[in-house]
Structures are given as C-alpha cells and as structure tokens.
Amino acid sequence: MENVISTLDMSHSIIYLFFGDIENTTAIERAHPEASLSKLNGHKKSYDMTGTPHSYISHYHLEVVPTLYQVPYWPNSHVYQYTYNHNTFEVNHMPSLYFNYHIGGLTIVVKP
C-alpha cells in the first residue's frame, strides 16, 4: 500500500454561480445591489489537511426562487435569486462536492 493517496483536499472556490440569463442577472445586480442574486460568488472553502487521515464532503443545498422585477422605464426582468446552506462532513472514504438545488413553485414580483 505504499504510494497510495490516503486523503484528498476538497478545498474549493466558487468564482460565479447564477441561475437564468446572465444579462438579466448582471443588469438587476447593477441596478439593485440589495438584490444579491449571486450570494456564492467569490465563496471559498478551505480545509486544513495537515496531520489528518480524513477527507471531507462539502454539501450545498440551494433554494432557487424565480423573481420578476417590474420597474418603470425598464423592461421586465426575469431572474432567479437563491439562498443556500453549506454543510461539511469529515469522512474516511472518497471526498466529494455536492450541489443540490430546488426551484420554487412561486414567483416573487418586485415593484417600486
């Protein structure tokens, strides 16, 4: 069993995560910074692997909510906002990274 990898580092970085049309998402984020449509942008998770025989599972659960922005003098914009929960589990087997998501059945309408 020499030269066998005993642990794998599952540290990761999410550069950009969004749902729907990128043009609508970026336009709404610029016009309404409080919208926070891409909460995981720039998210980093790093694990200290020094001296541990274990690996990790990272599990993200996302609730995606369809949203319609109706702003005067601006075309209606359909976007998707989301909330998330992140859990980490220490394991003695193959590490993994999961993204589970649920798209809600209701649409939120934002008006001025």
Image (spheres, grey):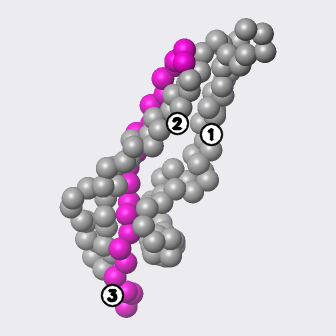
Q: Is residue 87 magenta?
A: yes
> Considering only vertical position in the picture, is 2 above or below 10?
above
Residue that numbered label 3 is attached to: 72
Q: Which residue is mark 2?
A: 97
Which dot, 2 or 3, sits closer to the camera?
2
Is mark 3 in CB contact (under 8 Å) with mark 1? Answer: no
Q: SS class of the residue under badge 2? A: strand
Mark 3 or mark 1: which is in front? 1
Q: In the rendered view, would you say 91 is above or below 85?
A: above
> Outermost residue toward the top?
1
Q: Is 105 situated left or right of 62 in this image?
A: left
Q: Which residue shows up at 78% across the image and 10% down it?
A: 2
Residue under the image location 48 percent in, 23 percent down: 89
Residue 52 image-quadrant placement? top right
Quadrant of image for the C terminus: bottom left
Q: Secondary structure at mark 3?
A: loop
Depth order, front residue of 5/33: 5
**What label sits on residue 12 in the rendered view?**
1
Mark 2 or 1: in front is 2
Q: Position of residue 27 (x, y in %)?
A: 49, 76
